[in-house]
Amino acid sequence: MSYEGKFPRGLVVRLFAYLVAGHLFAAFLYLLFALGAK
C-alpha cells in the first residue's frame, strides 16, 4: 500500500514536516506554561 499514486511526493513530505513542526511548537508552548505555572 503506497501513497505514491494518490499524492505527490512533495505534498507528503511537506505535510509530514508541518506535523513535526506543529508538535514541536505545541510541546514548547506546553513546557512554557507548565514551567510558568510553578
Image: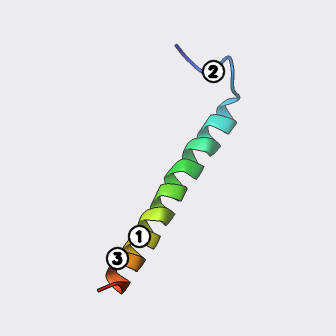
- The residue lying at 50 percent from left, 51 percent from top is 20
Instruction: Give the SS element for disc 1.
Output: helix
Front label number (3 vs 2): 3
Place residue 31 in its image quadrant: bottom left
Mark 2–mark 1 distance (CA, rounded to whole Å): 35 Å
Task: Look at mark 3 in the image and give the residue it sits on.
Answer: 34
- Mark 1 crowdedness (10 Å alpha carbons): few <14, some 14-19, many ≥20: few
Where 22 falls versus 34 (above or below)?
above
- Mark 3 crowdedness (10 Å alpha carbons): few <14, some 14-19, many ≥20: few
Say whether residue 36 is left or right of residue 6.
Answer: left
- The residue lying at 41 percent from left, 70 percent from top is 30
Contact flag, marks 3 and 1 (Cβ < 8 Å): yes
Three-letter amino acid code at disc 2?
Glu
- What quarter of the picture does the C terminus occupy? bottom left
- Mark 2 crowdedness (10 Å alpha carbons): few <14, some 14-19, many ≥20: few
Where 24 falls versus 1 (above or below)?
below
Place residue 6 in its image quadrant: top right
- The residue lying at 46 percent from left, 72 percent from top is 29
Residue extending furthest toward the top = 1
State the residue in front, 13 or 33.
Answer: 33
Where is residue 8 drawn, in percent x and y? Answer: 70, 29
Mark 3–mark 1 distance (CA, rounded to whole Å): 6 Å
Where is residue 35 drawn, in percent x and y? Answer: 33, 81
State the residue in front, 14 or 22.
Answer: 22
On residue 30, the disc is: 1
On residue 21, the disc is: none
Contact flag, marks 2 and 1 (Cβ < 8 Å): no
On residue 4, the disc is: 2
Three-letter amino acid code at disc 3?
Ala
Three-letter amino acid code at disc 1?
Tyr
